[in-house]
Image (cartoon, rainbow, N blue to C red):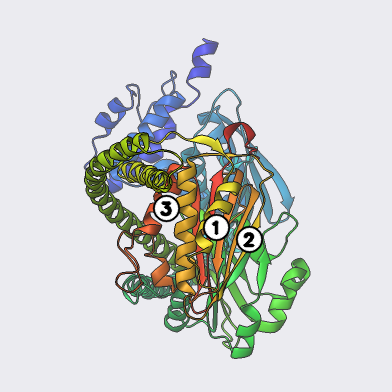
Amino acid sequence: METAKEEKPYSNKVLDAYVILIQEKYPEIDIEDLMGEAGIGNYSKNNDNPQGLSQAQINRFHEHLRIRTDNMKIAREAGRYAVTPGCLGMLRRRVLPFAGVRRACKMMAKYAGNLTRSVCYHINYIKKNTIEVVITPNEEIKEEPFQCEIRQGYFQGLADVFLHNELTVRHSECMFKGGKVCRYELSWKNSAFPILAMLCGLSGVAAIAMPIMFRITPWAVGYKSLWLICPAVLCLGLGWAAQWMKSKALVKSLIGFHKAREEMINQVELNVKNSKAIVEIGQVLGIEDPDACIFNRAANIVGKKLRYDRVMIMIADDEKTFLSYRGGYGFTEVEKLYINEYRISLGESSEGVFYESFMDNKTMLVNDMAWLKRKFPQSQELVDRIKPRSFIISPIEVDGAPIGIMIAGNTVTLRRLDNNDTHLVMAVAQQIGCVYRRQKCEAQQGEFKRQIVQLQKMEALGVLAGGIAHDFNNILSPIIGYTDLCLAMCPKDEKMFKYLYRVKNASGRAQDLVAQILAFSRQGEKEYIRCHPGPIIKESLKLLRASVPVNIKIETLITSDFAPIMADPTQIHQLVMNLCTNAYHAMAGKGGTLTVCLDEMLVKESFLKETRRMLPGSYVHLQVKDTGHGMSRAVMDNIFEPYFTTKIKGRGTGMGLPIIKGIVARLKGYIFVDSTEGEWSCFDIYLPQAAENRSVQ
């Protein structure tokens, strides 16, 4: 029996408020069918079944009712109906206002305690017109959040009953939001209504009792008419006073209702206006000038359309070490000079309102500049320069992570910013993040398409090169064969022998070139050996010196005391020859300096910028730099494409740099180019050192 009681701690009368609500507002719902779905077969409104209801049955009933009514606040509504005459009864409803708030809460606690054992009700008296109702949960029975909503609805209904007392309810602690108990604080004002209503009732009783008394006591005949009139007049007067007080409270409530309605209408109109502005901003950001800086464009649109005096957008760098200015609106030229250089550190020791907003990914509204200076002295310099009256900081998110912040505020306009502005700025920041993400995706797609086109070109070029290499190899075979026959027949001391030997060496180099072309076309594989690039580079520069004009100076800084690389020496020779040839072609006519450097470099995490991402490890670094005419950004974007060349006809084929890039890629290295048009160009090649000597950190 004890186990059964623990399993079913609720009286079926806890559903009475739900049933009355359904009958009045949702008559289309079949109550018996609803009870059957919830597994409640013993419900009777007029009979408290001793078997009771379990928590699971209550949960199922509420869930099915919520689905059928499509009302997420059905529990709160049922709580308010618990104070209606249908639940309390007409007499209790009439008597309750005379009992006072304290007695009413005591009655509620006693009545609720008889209906459930899932919680315990305690009433604490805080002060004269304030009490606290504490709901302590039973550890053996787990309530659901909707049951807290029922209690909140009940207290709202109680406030309607005690309208003349101006009863207010505050839910200061909730067990479903991290609290240990549910705590409700009820405050009210004193009212003469209960006393007047009671005196009115007594006067009415006296007015009825007087005629009977006068029949029994004939000695008061002289004053009979006066004694009969006084109680009736008193009853009417007191009744009028009580109703006047009640009407006054009702009028005050109606005025508050109308005021709330006007505020709601204004809020709806403001929300519609803001929604249109946000949609318009999103459309403008997505359509107008997609190649321009989105942040500067967004700041101007937000400032003009939403009428903020100042808008500033700050974006984090790739490593998220600092925030820097990327776009703004409403700043003077002097202010722009300052904010263009303004940086917000994102290090562990950093502080400030902007740092907190970015790191915690939260929107902040600041209306008190004195408070800001006290709490965040790091932000004082910016505040003193911009002098805002109030401002909002909202993170700009991409894929759930902040990439920057948007700051919108007023410096001249006297209007203080509020929660409406906060939500508006948050929505705009979200729009900016979405557009920025879309533009990045479009840029990546464009880059992928460009790479696919380049791969297709390289594939077609590889097929062509493979065919030519095979034909050229067939031509070389008889040349080498006949040269070997001539060498065998010719004495070594004759001049002819030396000439033939040079022909054989040249043919050997031609065979190596054929092997390179076949490797480029993926029709042949090279076997790499451990080699030191230093001696190969020096030998290549000696051969190159004879063809370089005298007005071009060659400077070398080659270090050879480091670990070797896995490569083919012919490929290293080809890299140096192609790069140096391009360099002295760029300096032809005016002369200049060709610098070739070779050293060792250890690359760590985030050592280089985003455009030079590399796997960490030890690399051999080859740099070829010239002081020629340089290259524009458009030229640098295309120099590794096959057949692209800026040289005059007959001096370039457009194949040198694509072949170099292919060689570096097969060696698992990296090649980067940097240039200033009209001044210089520089190529950096990073080749990984042999595996057993690599140092990765």
Quarter occupied by residue 254: bottom left
* Image position, residue 112 (x, y; %): 54, 35
- Comparing 594 with 490, the one in front is 490
Mark 2 or mark 3: whose residue is earlier in sequence: 2
Which amino acid type corresponds to the residue marked 1 in the rendered image?
A: Leu
* Image position, residue 195 (x, y; %): 61, 59
Location of residue 632 with respect to 610 vertically, above or below: below
- Depth-wise, is mark 3 or mark 1 nearer the camera? 1
Q: Say if residue 205 shows up in the picture.
A: no
- Depth-wise, is mark 2 or mark 3 nearer the camera? 2
Q: Residue at x 64, y 89 (%)?
A: 334
Mark 1 or mark 2: whose residue is earlier in sequence: 1
Asked which secondary structure carries label 1, the reply is helix
Which amino acid type corresponds to the residue marked 3 in the rendered image?
A: Lys
Quarter occupied by residue 691: top right
* Image position, residue 17 (x, y; %): 40, 40
Q: Residue at x 49, y 43 (%)?
A: 569
- Comparing 386 with 531, the one in front is 531
Q: Is residue 629 left or right of residue 370?
A: left
- Give the residue at mark 3: 661
Measure the C-alpha gap from mark 3 to mark 1. Answer: 20 Å
Q: Is residue 446 left or right of residue 187?
A: left
- Give the residue at mark 2: 556
Which amino acid type corresponds to the residue marked 2 in the rendered image?
A: Thr
Mark 3 or mark 1: whose residue is earlier in sequence: 1
Measure the C-alpha gap from mark 2 to mark 3. Answer: 23 Å
* Image position, residue 382 (x, y; %): 69, 77
For residue 541, the mark is: 1
Quarter occupied by residue 30: top left
